[in-house]
Image (tube, grey):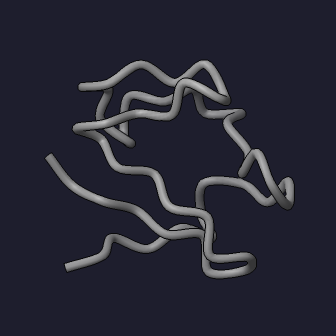
Amino acid sequence: MKTWVCTVCGWVYDEAVGDADYDLAAGVAFADLPEDFVCPLCGVDKSLFEQQE
C-alpha cells in the first residue's frame, strides 16, 4: 500500500488506512479512486497528488 500527498495543501491519503472522515475505505488504491476524485480539503484533482516514499 502507498501514501499519496496533495501537493497544494498537504492532505495525505494512506491507501492502507483510508480516511473515514471523507468516506474513503481502508485498502482502496489511489488509482482505484474515481477519476473525478478531488482533494477533500482544497478541491484539486488527482493529477496534483504525488506518491510519498
Tell me residue 9's x, y (percent): 73, 76
Task: Please give the count of numbered marks on the rendered protein.
Answer: 0
Give the vertical position of 22 relative to 9 (above or below). above
| Extreme residue toward the right, this view | 43
User: Viewer-proximal residue, 29 or 13?
Assistant: 13
Q: Residue at x 60, y 54 (%)?
A: 46
Tell me residue 39's x, y (percent): 72, 51
Give the vertical position of 52 relative to 45 (above or below). below
Toward which corner of the image does residue 23 lie, by quadrant? top right
Q: Residue at x 71, y 33 (%)?
A: 36
**Is residue 8 rendered to the left or right of residue 50?**
right
User: Viewer-proximal residue, 32 or 2?
Assistant: 2
| Extreme residue toward the front, this view | 21
**Is residue 50 rendered to the left or right of residue 17?**
right
Q: Residue at x 14, y 46 (%)?
A: 1
**Is residue 14 rendered to the left or right of residue 10?**
left
Give the vertical position of 18 relative to 3 (above or below). above
Tell me residue 42's x, y (percent): 85, 61
Tell me residue 53's x, y (percent): 19, 79
Give the vertical position of 25 relative to 46 (above or below). above
Toward which corner of the image does residue 37 lie, by quadrant? top right
Q: Residue at x 62, y 76 (%)?
A: 10
